[in-house]
Amino acid sequence: MKADDPGILWIEEPQLGLSGRMYLPIYMHGLTTTFRHMKNSLLGKAVTVSYPDEEPHIDNPAIYRGTHRLNRDSQGRVKCVACFLCATACPAHCIDIVAAESPWPDREKYPQSFCIDELRCIFCGMCEEACPVDAIELTSLYNLTGRSREEMIFDKEKLLSVYDQTHEREPMRSPEMGGTV
Amino acid sequence: MATVIIDGQEIQLAEGERLNGVQAAARAGIEIPHYCWHPGLSVVASCRMCLVEVGRRDDKTGKIAMQPKLVPACQTPATDGTVFVTNSKKVADARAMVEEDLLLRHPVDCPICDKAGECLLQDYHFRYGQETRRADIKPFTSRRRELGPAVTLFVDRCVMCSRCVRFCREVAGTSELMVANRGAHEEIDVFPGFPLANKLSGNVVDLCPVGALGDRDFLYQQRVWFMKGHSHVCANCSAGCSIRIDENQDQIYRIKPRENPQVNRWWICDEGRYGWKHVHDPNRCVTAQKRQAAGAAPMEWSPLIAELDTRLRRSRRLAAVVSPHLTVEEAYLLCRYVREIDAEAALVLGPVPQSDGDEKYPGGFTIRAEKCPNRRGVEQIITHFAGECAGWEHFLERLTKERFDAVWVSGGYCSQWHDAAAADRFSSADILIVQDLFALPLMRRADYQLPGAAYPERDGSYVNHAGRLQSFGWAIRPPAGAMVEGQLYWRLLKRPGLYQSRAVLDEVARDILYFRAAAEPVPETGVDLNCTPAAGAP
């Protein structure tokens, strides 16, 4: 999208009104939010949970950014085409892909190896956005633990197994949700 | 003097200069997009991407008369008074239309296409194409077939610019490729049983403006935007082609030609293109070792250099074999060091590998028979220090008769460059120092076994067969444990800091008449050492 695209709506920063320029009214307005939360937590309506005794409730798993998964295509093969766009977009450089010619006649390129260093990942979701075939997605699995650093480098099989675990309750992005498939 | 007007800018062309519209516009800093035209090939004007408005200014009245139709800029000579208009709505519409037509049947599989990132179809689409796709044809996967050992064709990505076909006919002269069928069914193909197997075949991949022709060696190895290109000079023969080494994190992925009208124009041969595999050979020596009674023991570089220097300075009769793979600067430093200790030290040119003969191609490209990059440069350096340049065979003879206290052998060859019999001749030397890439007989026999650098790791200058000196910087770092020859000699000569090839070249240009032209900064295309009138050396 170019900067002069008609689809872009350019807006100006709004001018401060009288109360904004006087500073105190806006300051008081901000404090009311603080006091409202204080009142709620005193009345037992806290927004925090006592993890790990209590499990957090995830409202919308589709937009939650937890552990990655690699999706499978309709034939159960890895959906990734090894285009490296996730690795390119990744600001933490935590994705390592080795591409190769695919062993299947209907597909050209596939990832021979696909590793994500979950310790290095900052869960920004850029990989998910960059993926042209919706192969990499972030799931709502948030309790990511391991006993060693090596264990936290997820390879292709492990990422596919995350898909197998989660695809029933978290379906792949459909075209209605902005996906390609 | 001809005056050409491009979008209102007046461009002066030199006397006798023959440019077309695309070149003249480039001179004015204006890009005219084109697929089929290439400066090294004949003009076919078939892609229609370079359509512009053309007119003529009347010399007397100054009035401009434009042609009613758009014409291809690649086929229009820029003569005195020619007017090109490239920024009108008519031209922009024509370009968008050509782009739309090309993309109609293009698979748009950029995510898996190796060309993505350096693809003209992509770039031009962003610059000149339309925002939306009007056709509702679904993208499909591209059919693929192998054209030869080095090249594969993705049939549906092709835009039928026919550059590859013309290259095979005009430059390689082998005519393997052809355009089969007609109209929308046109395809590039080879005749059955005649694969694209000439020694220049890799160039068609560079020529392809889209991702239709793929390099089988590079296929899917790396995305182009991860790689950094470094200007370098090919070391596989004495032609000294200008190349660009594409690497990522010290791993070479491919080598591409770099335009140099004086040397290789736009091409390189496949020997040079794939001649870097030895650089990443797992068998390369990477530990400096000292041979002792119990066998070779690894040694740190700093104590090793100090010990080497002390021992060499105690010896009287020295000899150095200067490899034609060393740069001019490295050869100079080595000769300088050895001669500093023994003013009569024997300086010998290492073996010069030869193939059966020069291979000439109709397009003017030649693969030289001499398979080393810097024979001429090293010869001149040795002649400067020793008065004459002795050869390897001659030195082997001499070794049977004479005794040397210490012999320094520099290697750097990509393959077996001597046999065990030759190595045995060196048994008379008290100290044998060998710096090479692989553990060859001479290396195994050496008292000091030093891992050296391959050509992408060097910086310095090579002098090619015609006496053209080209300077380059290192493209990758040597593997951990190896030391670039220049750095080692620099430290032996007790110079401060890191090896600086430019400082040494200044010294060489000052000391040796032949290299006088290199005193000025060396341009990307190199400098011709024969052109200096004062350098009267034969």
Image (cartoon, helix red, strand yellow):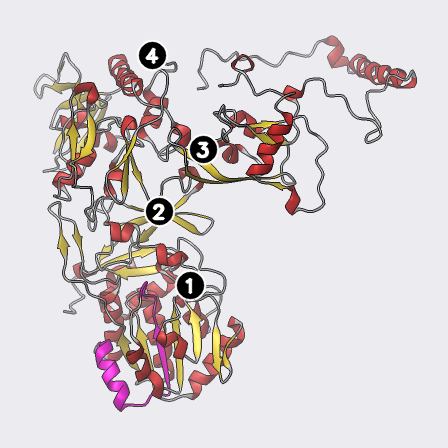
Q: Residue furthest top?
A: A18
Q: Of the residues shown, which amino acid type is indicated by label 2?
A: Arg
What is the CA distance from the residue labelled 1 to the residue labelled 2? 21 Å
What is the CA distance from the residue labelled 4 to the residue labelled 3? 25 Å
Left or right: B515 with respect to A167? left
Task: Identify the mark at residue B254; answer none if there is no mark.
Answer: 2
Q: Which chain carries label 2?
A: B
Callout 4 and callout 1 share a chain: yes
Task: Identify the mark at residue A83; answer none if there is no mark.
Answer: 3
Q: Mark 1 lies on which chain?
A: B
- Disc 4: which residue: B135
Instruction: Name the quadrant containing residue B43.
Output: top left
Residue nearest the observer in this picture, B535 or B127: B127
Quadrant of the frame with the N terminus of chain B: top left
Q: Work out whether B366 lies above or below A84.
A: below
- Disc 1: which residue: B283
Callout 3 and callout 1 share a chain: no
Secondary structure of the residue carrying numbered label 4 = loop
What is the CA distance from the residue labelled 3 to the residue labelled 1? 32 Å
Q: Residue at x 51, y 83 (%)?
A: B294
Q: Mark 4 lies on which chain?
A: B
Q: Percent from the top left, x then y, of residue A90?
A: 55, 34
Q: Of the residues shown, which amino acid type is indicated by label 3?
A: Cys
Task: Identify the mark at residue B43; answer none if there is no mark.
Answer: none
- As for residue B285 lying within the magenta part, the answer is no
What is the CA distance from the residue labelled 3 to the residue labelled 2? 19 Å
Q: Which of marks 4 and 2 is nearer the N terminus?
A: 4
Q: Say if mark 4 contacts mark 3, CB within 8 Å.
A: no
